[in-house]
Amino acid sequence: MNFNTVSVFNLSPPEKLQLVEDLWDDLAAAPEEVPVQEWQKVELARRKANLLNKTVPPPFSRITRSPKMA
């Protein structure tokens, strides 16, 4: 068999976006097969608790403010 290899780095931006979309759709089709790390489970639980407790994150302007301005 003769396969023509194409590097993803040679794809155009629209082709790269389509590839990412196709990969994402493929992963979403079988979420139980996607490995989830323990730290991700902890972070998800933290975020879920924040939602249930209606904890509001700080405003973006406060997060991006330089330490000198704080």
Image (cartoon, helix red, strand yellow):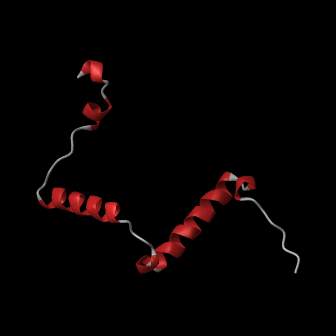
Count numbered badges in the picture: 0
Q: Please identify the residue farthest to the top as the structure is shown.
A: 68
State the image coordinates of residue 19 (x, y, percent, origin top left). Answer: 62, 64
Identify which residue, 31 or 14, lies in the foreground: 31
State the image coordinates of residue 5 (x, y, percent, origin top left). Answer: 80, 66
Identify which residue, 41 or 62, lies in the foreground: 41
Q: Please identify the residue farthest to the right as the structure is shown.
A: 2
Asked if residue 39 lies left or right of residue 56, the reply is right
Asked if residue 50 lies left or right of residue 43, the reply is left
Asked if residue 46 lies left or right of residue 37, the reply is left
Please tell me in which quadrant of the rendered image residue 67 appears: top left
Looking at the picture, does residue 10 appear above or below residue 57?
below
State the image coordinates of residue 9 (x, y, percent, origin top left). Answer: 71, 53
Asked if residue 33 lies left or right of residue 47, the reply is right
Q: Residue at x 14, y 51 (%)?
A: 55
Q: Please identify the residue farthest to the front as the structure is shown.
A: 38
Identify which residue, 41 or 17, lies in the foreground: 41
Q: Residue at x 33, y 60 (%)?
A: 39
State the image coordinates of residue 45 (x, y, percent, origin top left). Answer: 23, 63
Q: Quadrant of the N terminus?
A: bottom right
Q: Residue at x 30, y 65 (%)?
A: 41
